[in-house]
Image (cartoon, helix red, strand yellow):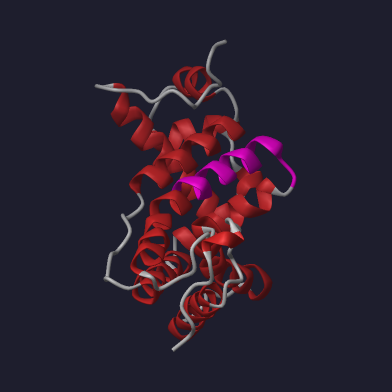
Amino acid sequence: MPAEPGTVRPGGRTARVRAAVLRAAGDVLAEQGFDRLDLADIARRAEVGKTTVYRRWGSVTGLVADLLADMAEQSLPRTETGSVLGDLTANADLVRRTLADPRQGPLFRAVIAAAACDARTARALRRFYDVRVAEWAPCVEQGVARGELPAGTDAAAVVRAVSAPLYYTLLTTGEAPDAAAADRAARAAFAAAVAGVYVTGDPAAGPGPSPA
């Protein structure tokens, strides 16, 4: 089965074309929203032939899918502080800074809004978050191994619990969460994890450590 347009990574000289087109698409999303995306306009902004853009991505949703894949690949790696709370706090701060960024914040709002009514964009957004959650999940797994969290803790669920209230703030108020909100999100997720809220493994593994 042939790959969907916009899902095959180019190499060599075509990589520069991809970078220019994705940058232009991100600019339009941040400035004007999903409904203003137009492949011909993107080609003009990127100084690339329209035929190249239509052949390479095929549709606006194909372009957004590739943009999200690129954003996942380019995101900063996780921070390892030596403690679960430290790592979750670093994750929360990274999410906060991303949402507060004058370009990235509006871009994410536009993509999330589009995902609510477009299935392919929703799948692409899900893949983006799957990559980011997988990047940070080891900090929780390491915490389980160190005895900071109960055995059977669902690492992905803990990582999602950190970012969920931060995105909720952005989407319901239109404002990026501040540093205090990020700190609360990390501490709340950690406290719930210590209490066993996210344990989904074998109960026979025994309870985890009691909160200090």
Range shown magenta: 117-131
Q: Quadrant of the N terminus?
A: top right
Residue name at image x 45 percent, y 46 percent: 131
Instruction: Say whether residue 112 is left or right of residue 81.
Output: right
Where's residue 32, x and y in %? Answer: 58, 53
Q: Position of residue 152 (x, y in %)?
A: 53, 59
* Residue at image location 54% in from the left, 39% down from the top: 64
In the image shown, does 161 or 127 lie closer to the viewer? 161
Instruction: Using the image as rendered, state which of residue 125 and residue 18 is in the foreground.
Output: 125
161 over 181 or under it: above or below: above
Name of the residue lying farthest toward the front: 204
Q: Check the image and name the residue furthest to the right.
A: 117
Any magenta on residue 53?
A: no
Question: Is residue 153 in view?
Answer: no
Residue 38, by quadrant, is top right
Residue at the outermost bottom position: 212
Judge whether residue 124 is colored magenta: yes
Q: Camera-side residue: 10 or 82?
A: 82
Question: Does any portion of residue 48 appear in the rendered image?
Answer: yes
Is 192 drawn above or below residue 19 in the view shown? below
Q: Identify the image quadrant of residue 118.
A: top right
| Image location of residue 145, percent across then percent down | 36, 62
Q: Main secondary structure of the magenta part?
A: helix
